[in-house]
Image (cartoon, rainbow, N blue to C red):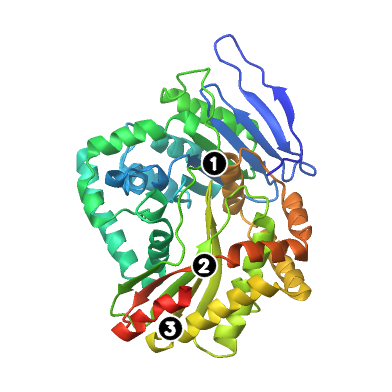
Amino acid sequence: MTSRSSKVTARPSSEARAVARTQTLIKGTAGIGTVRKTTLPGGLRVVTETLPSVRSATFGIWAHVGSRDETPSLNGATHYLEHLLFKGTTRRSALDISSALDAVGGEMNAFTAKEYTCYYARVLDTDLPLAIDVVCDMLTGSLILEEDVNVERGAILEEIAMTEDDPGDCVHDLFAHTMFGDNALGRPVLGTVDTVNALTADRIRRFYRKHYDPTHLVVACAGNIDHNKVVRQVRAAFEKAGALRDPDARPIAPREGRRTIRTSGKVELLARKTEQAHVVLGMPGIARADDRRWAMGVLNTALGGGMSSRLFQEVREKRGLAYSVYSYTSAFADCGLFGVYAGCRPSQVHDVLRICRDELDHVAQNGLSDDEIARAIGQLRGSTVLGLEDTGALMNRIGKSELCWGEQMSVDDMLAKMEAVTPDEVREVARDILGQRPSLSVIGPLKDKQASRLHDVVA
């Protein structure tokens, strides 16, 4: 990703405090949409986007750690730690943390992914100092007590059970395992019952100390905010916790990946007594920073991104074989996935898979029409802008961009990238991606004869 501008100015400092470096990454109009970044002594980055027309603000802290950073015995530790940071600090109990935001009508939550974790709070602009203090306190002062680890273990095991009870969700974890096997990207973010039961407070504390250093964190804030005030409040919170100890520390670089090995032509079936069969048919995709990602986004939208997409029309509208059918992409630092999901009656599973495979093969060989590509570009542009209409989405965009790319891109530049995609580029990426031999994951009550035919789909 590229930034629109990069104006660097040194912030004033006193003899007692080291100098912070501030940049204007995107220059907005009349201050609206201006993105600024300050790197504090100690390696902590603070990125903000100003939107004076709203009365809210979303504050988040992104950590450069996900389930990909776990060893097999630590599987689930990142997500476990996400839960534990809400359980209490040296300054606040778990009730204090939740009641502080509830008292002002705020929202607070977190999520763990394979390559990062995010903690955030959305509040009225006037309550932003409270949100900053609470979230920073959680990230820097968590106690991780043994009794909290034991109590939260039960909640996490229930979350795992809840996921396993939803085959439409579980099949995506199965597909990751089908494609990546028994390595970090192939293992579930939540961990397993066995790995979660084996995690101890001491091991989680060591994981916390290793991965929650300020050099591994990005603070992101968007809404009706003042960049300098946010920086001062964040710096005060981290200094109070003694977290900015090394003034010469530098932020960790964006993740480069490990050249993860992916499979092709593999089939995994998880037999379950469900009403529907849930399937994901897919193949290796592209990495997060691949220049073809814009064309891949157009291809994905045209194939299975909406009601006018090929897969929706062929599987649902024309034949009524499935209620839910769509395609999706997952991009990581060094690799990616492209998948097609469908949920259908077990007796229809082979018809659905045949149609999906035929469509993928047809587009790989013949490409999409100019009209399909133009419609997909329009859909992408509109959904991108509409998806950034709240401060939470803006915070996610600037936080993830800084953590994963180390750069920012304005919305106008993103739209221009989409508009610049040519039909030839879409057809080329279709040949490269869809021309590969697919793999298949299935959850459902398939009989032996049905199961034996699944390999024909990927042949």
Say if residue 22 shows up in the picture: yes
**Residue at which label 2 appears:** 437
Mark 2 is surrounded, within 10 Å at the Cα level, by few (under 14), some (14 to 19) or many (20 or more) other residues, namely some
Give residue 188's quadrant in the image. bottom left
Is residue 257 shown left or right of residue 170?
Answer: right
Which amino acid, mark 2?
Arg
Q: Where is residue 186 in the image (x, y as percent from the top left)?
A: 39, 55
Instruction: For mark 1, give the secondary structure.
Output: helix
Which quarter of the picture shows residue 266? bottom left
* Front one among 387 and 275: 275
Q: Pointer 3: what residue?
A: 349
User: What amino acid type is highlighted by mark number 1?
Assistant: Leu
Q: In this view, does 239 lie above or below 341?
A: above
Image location (x, y in percent) of residue 284:
52, 59
Q: Residue placed at 34% from the left, 65% from the top? A: 163
User: From the viewer's perspective, is 424 left or right of 449?
Assistant: right
The residue under label 1 is: 128
What is the spatial separation of the Cα atoms under label 2 and label 3, in whole angstroms? 19 Å
